[in-house]
Amino acid sequence: MRATYTSIENVTNVEALKEEIAELSERAGEPNLWDDPAAAQVITSRLSHRQSELERLNTLASRIDDLEVLVELGQDEDDADSMGEAAAELESIQKSLKELEVVTLLSGEYDEREAVVTIRSGAGGVDAADFAEMLLRMYLRWAERHGYPTTVMDTSYAEEAGLKSATFEVNAPYAFGTLSVEAGTHRLVRISPFDNQGRRQTSFAAVEVIPLIEQTDSIDIPDNEIRVDVFRSSGPGGQSVNTTDSAVRLTHIPTGTVVSMQNEKSQLQNRAAAMRVLQSRLLLLKKEQEDAEKKAFAGDVKASWGDQMRSYVLNPYQMVKDLRTEHEVGNTSAVFDGAIDDFIEAGIRWRTDNRNAEK
């Protein structure tokens, strides 16, 4: 455990982390900090995240030291209770080390960013819309399990049940790097609750994950490249939930990228939120284009994502299987309740192996 911890500590670069915390603390203490609320929020949020990261490392080091003392006492006094307590703590520390070790694999340019996740229903009609809503709940429950704040920014309800699409933020460090392995096409196989003949139905939903834009990112979008449409927010069944045209749809004309926001109370707030997501998507698009150009120079390489990355089968048997990593579990209820850490970890390791193989 000490060797693993030392490896994690070296990759994390604790000294650089301490220097960044000192610099951010100094900036956070400036008297005119809140003259620019948006910039102040970025500084204080980053400071909090970095302090939590350092505290997590320090706490883990202390726990390893305490465990060593507990084991020595238990052995010296032949105390079965102490050894039992040590065994439980050993398992807990190993789990924490494993989680930290996975974080060290997140070395992409935007991996440490917060994330914006969009889920869209695909082929499969009302079952696909219901599946999209199941996935939204799954990811929100996953974030809740970890104590990560989330903000649902936009929901477009289907007519009969479920969602056409939903967009939400996960406001936690490394949320993008962590959740980006969830991007792709998800497939659900089950007996349709919407089919009065009880037939088995296959439906699909797409998950998109992009890094949240920061003020330092240079994404300038000329006004003449954006079309702005305003409309009334709506709830399930198309029922009006807002009597003013507060919802906003932005279309980036050159790329055809469309972003809708309706969950804020004012048109101005929805437009600001939509612009932030649009900038985030264009930032990722720019990065993907640059990567594609690099790969073209390097020659043909194996594609990293397929059209279908995970299957959720509820009938005739129960199993969730990732088609890239081969990781699978039989407890489908737990997965839909947010227990997806093993899938995410396997995906991150799979992606790291593929990147290393391409170098």
Image (cartoon, rainbow, N blue to C red):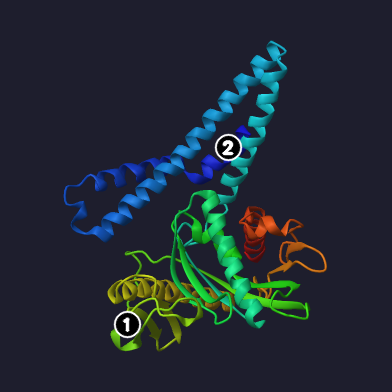
Residue on which disc 1 sits:
245
Tell me which numbered mark, 1 or 2, is placed earlier along the sequence: 2
- Amino acid type of the residue that numbered disc 1 sits on in the rendered structure: Asp
As displayed, is residue 102 above or below residue 194? Answer: above
Specify whether residue 104 is in view: no
* 139 and 72: which is toward the camera: 139
Horizontal side, residue 166 vs residue 202: left or right: left
Image quadrant containing the C terminus: bottom right
Where in the figure is residue 308, as x and y percent of width and height?
A: 69, 74
* Residue at 32% across, 41% down: 22
Horizontal side, residue 146 vs residue 323: left or right: left
Q: In front: mark 1 or mark 2?
A: 1
Mark 2 Cα-neighbour bin, 10 Å: few <14, some 14–19, many ≥20: some
Q: Which mark is residue 5?
A: 2
Image quadrant containing the N terminus: top right
Q: Tell me the quarter of the picture where residue 246 sits.
A: bottom left
